[in-house]
Amino acid sequence: MAFFSGLAGQACAETIISKSVSYFTIRGTTAEELDHELNRRGPLTKTSGLRHPGATRIKFGGAVTYFEKGGRCRVQEARITLSTQIILPQWKNRKKAKPGLAMIWETLSADIKRHEERHAEIARNHARDMERKLLRLGPERSCEALQARVAAVSKAAIDTHDRDQARFDRIEAANFEDRMMRLLRHRMKAKTLN
């Protein structure tokens, strides 16, 4: 956090977002082997302490600058940074597996990717919302008081983000089997039409 004194300018924002994708390798020629590999090699998440078939690591950061004028302190600039790293499985020795397993894998793999991309999207939406909230903060009598409000708004925004991510995971888990069956039926239908 930096302080600036001087002329009041228009508050501005610049959300800086980066995303990367990395892969972990799994091997196997049966559904049981693939499941075992996902449970053994999948990324370990801090929230559950368990391994998952995919993960999105999210890191928020940023800075707020202030200016003082007429005995009041205002937010001059809010710059939120967001870094997301999506971690996905990559299946080796796929050519040795039966075609039916390959179709199941393609369906599961696409769903894992969609799921993790949605986590990144939720984070992006929250980063932009946090920035807007910080820019809308009204003036305070001191920059120290405004800094305290910025900290409170930032904490509340991160807490809301975390709850939204957890809600998304709960909904996805509850609908997993139905979603997979629907996706598999769709793929099989598309394959028979081709």
Image (cartoon, grey):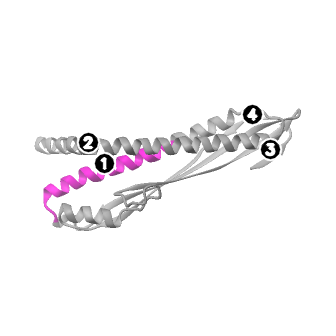
Alpha-carbon distance for marks 3 and 1? 47 Å
Separation of disc 4 and disc 3 at Cα? 20 Å
Q: Residue under circle 2?
A: 179
Q: Give the side of residue 74 with respect to residue 46, left or right.
A: right
User: Which secondary structure lies at badge 4?
Assistant: loop
Residue at image location 12% in from the left, 40% down from the top: 193
The residue type indicated by label 1 comes to: Asp
Local crowd size for mark 1, using a 10 Å CA cut-off: few (<14), some (14–19), many (≥20): some
> Do residues under tags 2 and 1 come within 8 Å of each other at their CB atoms?
yes
Across and down, in percent, residue 160 comes to: 54, 40
Which residue is labeled 1 in the image? 111
| C-alpha gap between disc 2 and disc 4 | 47 Å
* Residue for point 14% across, 55% down: 100
Q: Is residue 22 above or below residue 118?
A: below
Question: Helix, strand, or loop for circle 2?
Answer: helix
Q: Which mark is residue 57?
A: none
Q: Which residue is mark 4?
A: 10
Q: Are marks 2 and 4 in contact (CB under 8 Å)?
A: no
Residue at horizontal 36%, vertical 62%? 42
Distance (Cα) linking label 4 and label 1: 43 Å
N-terminal-most mark, 2 or 1: 1
How far from the left and from the top, in percent, is residue 163?
49, 42
**Region in magenta:** 97-124
